[in-house]
Amino acid sequence: MLQVLACGVVVFPGLFFAFRRILPSIFKRWTDADVVLVSERLVSSIHAIMATTVGCIVVSSCRGNVISDRSWLATYFVIWYGVPYMTYDLYAMYLSHYYRFQVKGHEDYKRHSLRTVNSFVRKEFLLVLHHIALLTILLPVTLFFRKDQGDFFVGCLFLTELSTPFVSLGKILIQLSLQDCRLHKANGGMVLLTFFACRIALFPYMYWMYGRHYGIPLHAVPFHLSLATNLGNCCILAPQVYWFVLLCRKGFRMYQRSRCRGGAATLCPASTSAGITDNTKGE
């Protein structure tokens, strides 16, 4: 068990620190904040591709019986890579926060302290809560409380990571000052599409598959499940809806900015001229 757990413990921090060494030699003008941000996004994309691939394998192999069909990857991917990644990502997000404010010259960020950690938790509270909830709720449910059932639905949850590479690519393109290129605009569309499909529409789909298995209509599925299951799904879904609304707002501002640049610049509202960034991880 410890050996397989070490897989993710070594892989994700190892990739992160490797990128931190490689990127400054390529982009010599980047600050520490730039390097840490892009390194974090690259590792997030690698994990997301792994999780999405595993999710596709699990879902496709368990479609016959969504309750009792088994796939060894459903449990072991969480142990090997899920838990180590979430733990590492909390640390990487803190470093990104720390260097971002250090570059801005904040006095409290001359060195690491409890004050900088507290500031990080307050500013990124939803993301921190999301990671801690996955570590403290998803892990025990996956390992101990499923009674060897529901691998199909665990695979579906892995598919929520599909949007992460597109979110990360958008951040990296902005870092490279390519936010006005066609690739960035096309990527923005893919962010909205994949985020909605795999982080919001996925939940009604899982309820529908559950209902189809038991021969009950979609609207009756919540009454067939326990209150704890419904509340758990709502707790996972709620931040996804919030982040999707933020992404839609940023996409609308990007659309306004492109229209303004095509017309008279004097008619553009000041808010649309700002760079489009977001703190959505897409965890």
Image (cartoon, rainbow, N blue to C red):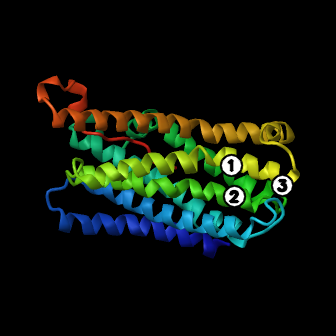
Tell me which residue sits at (68%, 68%) in the image.
Answer: 60
Image quadrant containing the N terminus:
bottom right
Front residue (pair 208, 283): 208
Q: Report crowding for label 3: few under 14, some 14 to 19, many 20 or more residues within 10 A (C-alpha).
A: few
User: Element under label 3?
Assistant: helix
**x and y percentages locating residue 278 in the rendered image:** 36, 41
Q: CA distance from mark 2 to mark 3?
A: 16 Å
Tell me which residue sits at (40%, 68%) in the image.
Answer: 15
- Which image quadrant for residue 69? bottom right
Tell me which residue sits at (62%, 40%) in the image.
Answer: 237
- Would residue 72 be visible to someone looking at this image? yes
Give amino acid for label 3. His
Give amino acid for label 1. Tyr
Q: Report crowding for label 1: few under 14, some 14 to 19, many 20 or more residues within 10 A (C-alpha).
A: some
Q: Which residue is mark 2?
A: 154
Instruction: Tally the numbered discs.
Output: 3
User: Element under label 1?
Assistant: helix
Name of the residue lying farthest toward the front: 263
User: Element under label 2?
Assistant: helix
Q: Which residue is mark 1?
A: 205
Is residue 48 depicted above or below 223 in this figure?
below
Q: CA distance from mark 2 to mark 1?
A: 13 Å
Sequence-wise, the earlier of marks 2 and 1 is 2
**x and y percentages locating residue 205 in the rendered image:** 68, 49
Sequence-wise, the earlier of marks 3 and 1 is 1
Query: Is 180 left, or right, of 190 in this rendering?
Result: left
Q: Nearer the viewer, mark 2 or mark 1?
A: 1
Give amino acid for label 2. Val
Q: Which residue is mark 3?
A: 213
Q: What's the mark number on residue 5?
A: none
